[in-house]
Each structure stands twice: as C-alpha cells, then as structure tokens.
C-alpha cells in the first residue's frame, strides 16, 4: 500500500523570505510534485515578539513570483485548516493537557532571575548551562496552590536525563544525541502561546505530514520532537535535513550577510526561473552533470536520495552566469517585457516597439541581470562624454571631413535600414576618400561614445535620424 506523500513548508514570519527558505520550500514542492503528493504551506506565527509586519505578504508574493504553488495553505481551503498557527492555539492547549495528565510535562514557576542565577552557577562549575529540572519535584498540592493563585509559569517537557537517542535521517543517516544535551524544553510560554516545538509536532501529526524536509539547523530539535511523538503515541514522519548554505569562504551564509532576500534578487533582475534553478542545485544534483533545469524538469528529476550532506556554497557569480543563460534563451518579445520596467525606471524614452526590439537584441548577450540594462544602454540615452584620446580622434582631419559630410547629407538618407545606411557609408567614402577604421571609428565614437560597439545601422536605428544628426553636428568643429 502506497501512502500519500504529504510535505509542508512551515516558515515563521520573522523576516522576508531568504534563499535558504526558498530552497526548503522548493525541495518540499519538488518532492510533492515528483511523487504526486501534497504540498502544504503552514505559517508558524506563534512567536508574537519576533513577528515582522508584512512578512506573510512577502512570503506569499515571493512564492507566487517563483512559481511554487501550494496545494493547501493560507487563502486555500484544505482539510487541515487553519494554516496559521496563531489560529490554532486552542488545539495545542488540549494536547498539552494530555501531556500534563500523563506526567510527560510539568508547570515550571522559575522566574527569569532564578534561571539567570542557575545559568551563572552552572557556568562557574564548568557545566553545560541547562534547566536543572527543579520544578519537576514540586508536590502536586504545591503545584495546585501556585496555579490557583495565578502564579506566572511555563509548561516544560520532561526529557530523560541520561542515555542517548538515535534516529535515521534521510540525508544525515544515523544521528545520535546524548539526552544530557537536551533541555527540558518549554512547550507553553508564560503568555500562554506554544513554542515552535510543540506546535510544529502537533501540526505535523494533525496534517498527516509524511516527510519533514527542512534546514540542518533544525537537526538538534529532532530529539525533543521524537520524544513528543513518543509521549503522544504518534508515528513520527520521515526526516531529511538539508545541508547548510555557505559563503564562498565556507563561512555560514547568514541571513544578515549581504542581500539574501529572494525579493531583492528578483528586483536586481534575476529571473525567477534562473533563481529556482540555481537554488535547486544548492545541495542537490541530478544524475548527470547537467545544470540548466526548468521547474517542470526539476519536478521530474528531483529525488531526496541525491541531497548531499556537505554544505552548499552560495556562489553569486554562478547565479549570474546562470541568469545570463536564461536571459539568452528568452525571445526578444519575452525579454522586452521583462526589461521594459528597468528602462522605464531609468527614465529612458523609447519611441516605438521596433526600437525597443533593437535595444533588447543589443543587450541580450551583454547582460547577466536585467538591472544592468540601464547602464549598458546608457550611451543611447545619455549625453556622451569624451576623453582626451577621443578628442584627438574627433579633431582629426579625416573625422571632421566625415562629420561635415554627414551633417550636410544625412537628410537625404531615405530610411535607416541596413541597406540604406551601407549605401550612405559608400557615398561618404566616395565623397571624402575616407574609409575603413578611419570612417567607422569616429562615427561610432560620435554616436555611441566608443569606437567599439554595435554596428552603425543598429546604433542609428536606436537613436533615430534626428538624434544621429544632432550627435554628429555637435562634433563638427568651426
Ligand atoms: N518555523 C520553522 C522555521 O521557521 C520551521 C522549521 C521546520 O520546518 O520544522 O523554519
């Protein structure tokens, strides 16, 4: 019997979606699509103090922008709703009562001051700081009286103090933790809200999650989670912990270091499909050396078996290279659509569609992100600046001859087609005797600000006749 695969992406809205979380979301999505399973989005928003305004909206917007469609979650109906943990607090309360009844959890009245002193003393004794479990030993009557008097408290999980626990992770294989490394985890905070650990386990169970796929930083939480499953008498899901993301110098990719927010990458002109392709390869590889994969191709190729243990380097240069590949694959119309906002934002006026198409054809193999477009196309739109060497070329007698001829005769060119312009260049040579580099370089310099660059007809079509003439006239000396 094949059970239906159900996976979830469970972000906490404590900041904007970053590349590490995008990878977690993507691998869950891919695994669901590959197996015909269900991909759930669950918002883990029980920590009110770390809640960042707009984070949920950013998350939904970003997932949509990169094409990661979920089957159950916010704004969708599903059997396990609600998908915001803050709307499920009643449920957690019920389950905690069960743990309390079983003696698997206990109220703890220790104040911040008490905990602080405890930690200091442990440090002085050279011990690993942890909660020493003193409230486990309160008598039932004492607990009753203190609860009845409304004393502030939390609920903690009873963790074994000796021995060890091991489990099998689909990526890390056998993992062992000694219990004395694990604290009596707080399950319910003094504000009555559950902690991540409690809510996460209960929801994974209630939402029938079969595979937990998440970042390696959660590996050390597994012992507590497995203990909860055991206390509840539930079957735990299979687990796959994804390798750390590293900077090229192998240090841990921090959320603060540089811009790692996915939306920033999109704004900087990385194509969503390139970003997804790049992120897919951060810790997973296909059976071949192939690197370029569309999302539908990834959906077919993905497998948990080929997730690597070693940390994955987040190499922005490679991302740029990949983005450039995707840009080159777009049709002129597609690239025009994506590029237009960047040209518009730069304040560049483009007279018509044909000119836009010429500009796009010009930039297509010269850029690696869309955000580079304004700079690469600046010579068409901004006043050109010339250096000393340029002035020498501009003032040369042959250049001036050519400029003068163009100033007087360019009006006669019927259109700016390649043919018409080539004919006009031949006429220029006939009339002035100037040819080859001496003809092309000063003209390109006058029109594009550089002796090297696109073909003259391309430049002229983008500039239009009027601006071409204007740029030439500017350089004709008295
Ligand atoms: N809410 C956790 C996070 O922010 C989820 C971790 C998990 O997938 O269990 O990443």
Image (spheres, helix red, strand yellow):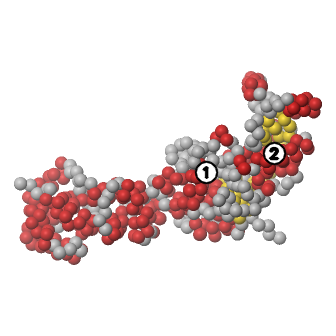
Q: Looking at the rendering, in which quadrant would you find the N terminus?
A: bottom right
Q: Is mark 2 within 8 Å of ligand 1?
A: no
Residues packed near mark 1 inside 10 Å, few (<14), some (14 to 19) or many (20 plus): many
Tag shown at residue 29:
none
Distance Cα–Cα, label 2 vs label 1: 25 Å
Q: Name the residue under label 1.
A: 56
Q: Mark 2 points at which residue?
A: 93
As displayed, is residue 258 above or below residue 338? above
Q: Looking at the rendering, in which quadrant would you find the C terminus?
A: bottom left
Q: Earlier in the sequence, mark 2 or mark 1?
A: 1
Please provide percent x and percent y for residue 37: 71, 66
Please provide percent x and percent y for residue 54: 57, 48
Please provide percent x and percent y for residue 141: 93, 31
Q: Which of 332 and 248 is in front in this view?
A: 332
371 left or right of 189 in image: left
Question: Residue, x 84% and y 44% (percent of image)?
Answer: 96
Seen from this angle, which residue lies furthest left? 478
For the residue labelled by badge 1, is the local secondary structure a helix, a strand or a loop? helix
Q: Is mark 1 within 8 Å of ligand 1?
A: no
Q: In which quarter of the image is residue 61?
A: bottom right
Q: In which quarter of the image is residue 365?
A: bottom left
Question: Residue, x 24% and y 74% (percent of image)?
Answer: 418
Please provide percent x and percent y for residue 300: 63, 70
Q: Is residue 209 visible?
A: no
121 left or right of 367 in image: right
């Amino acid at each position: 019997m094949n059970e239906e695969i159900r996976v979830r992406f469970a972000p906490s809205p404590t900041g904007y979606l970053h590349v590490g979380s995008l990878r977690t979301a993507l691998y869950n999505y891919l695994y669901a699509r590959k197996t015909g399973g269900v991909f759930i989005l669950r918002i883990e928003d029980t920590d009110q103090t770390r809640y960042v305004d707009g984070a949920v909206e950013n998350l939904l917007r970003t997932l949509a922008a990169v094409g990661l469609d979920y089957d159950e979650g916010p704004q969708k109906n599903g059997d396990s709703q609600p998908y915001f943990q803050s709307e499920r607090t009643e449920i957690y309360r019920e389950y905690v009562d069960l743990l309390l009844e079983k003696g698997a959890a206990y109220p703890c009245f220790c104040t911040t001051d008490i905990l602080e002193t405890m930690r200091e003393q442990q440090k002085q004794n050279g011990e690993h700081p942890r909660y020493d479990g003193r409230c486990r030993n309160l008598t039932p009557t004492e607990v009753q009286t203190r609860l009845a008097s409304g004393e502030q408290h939390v609920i903690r999980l009873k963790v074994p103090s000796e021995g060890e626990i091991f489990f099998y992770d689909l990526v890390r294989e056998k993992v062992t933790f000694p219990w004395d490394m694990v604290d009596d985890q707080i399950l319910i905070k003094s504000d009555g809200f559950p902690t991540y650990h409690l809510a996460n386990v209960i929801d994974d169970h209630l939402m029938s999650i079969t595979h937990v796929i998440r970042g390696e930083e959660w590996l050390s939480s597994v012992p507590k989670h497995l203990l909860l499953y055991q206390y509840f008498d539930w079957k735990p899901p299979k687990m796959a912990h994804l390798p750390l993301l590293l900077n090229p110098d192998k240090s841990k990719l921090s959320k603060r270091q540089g811009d790692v927010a996915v939306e920033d990458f999109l704004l900087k002109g990385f194509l969503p499909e390139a970003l997804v392709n790049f992120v897919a390869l951060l810790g997973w590889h296909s059976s071949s050396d192939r690197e370029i994969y569309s999302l539908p191709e990834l959906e077919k190729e993905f497998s948990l078996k080929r997730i690597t243990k070693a940390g994955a380097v987040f190499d922005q240069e490679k991302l740029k290279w990949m983005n450039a590949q995707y840009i080159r694959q777009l049709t002129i119309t597609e690239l025009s659509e994506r590029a237009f906002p960047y040209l518009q934002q730069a304040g560049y006026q483009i007279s018509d569609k044909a000119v836009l198409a010429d500009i796009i054809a010009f930039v297509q193999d010269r850029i690696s992100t869309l955000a580079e477009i304004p700079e690469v196309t600046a010579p068409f739109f901004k006043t050109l600046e010339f250096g000393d060497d340029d002035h020498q070329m501009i003032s040369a007698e042959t250049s001036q001859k050519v400029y003068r001829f163009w100033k007087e005769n360019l009006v006669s060119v019927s259109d700016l087609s390649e043919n018409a312009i080539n004919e006009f260049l031949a006429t220029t040579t006939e009339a002035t005797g100037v040819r080859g580099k001496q003809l092309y370089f000063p003209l390109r310099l006058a029109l594009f600000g550089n002796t090297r660059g696109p073909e003259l007809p391309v430049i002229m079509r983008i500039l239009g006749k009027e601006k071409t003439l204007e740029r030439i006239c500017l350089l004709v000396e008295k």
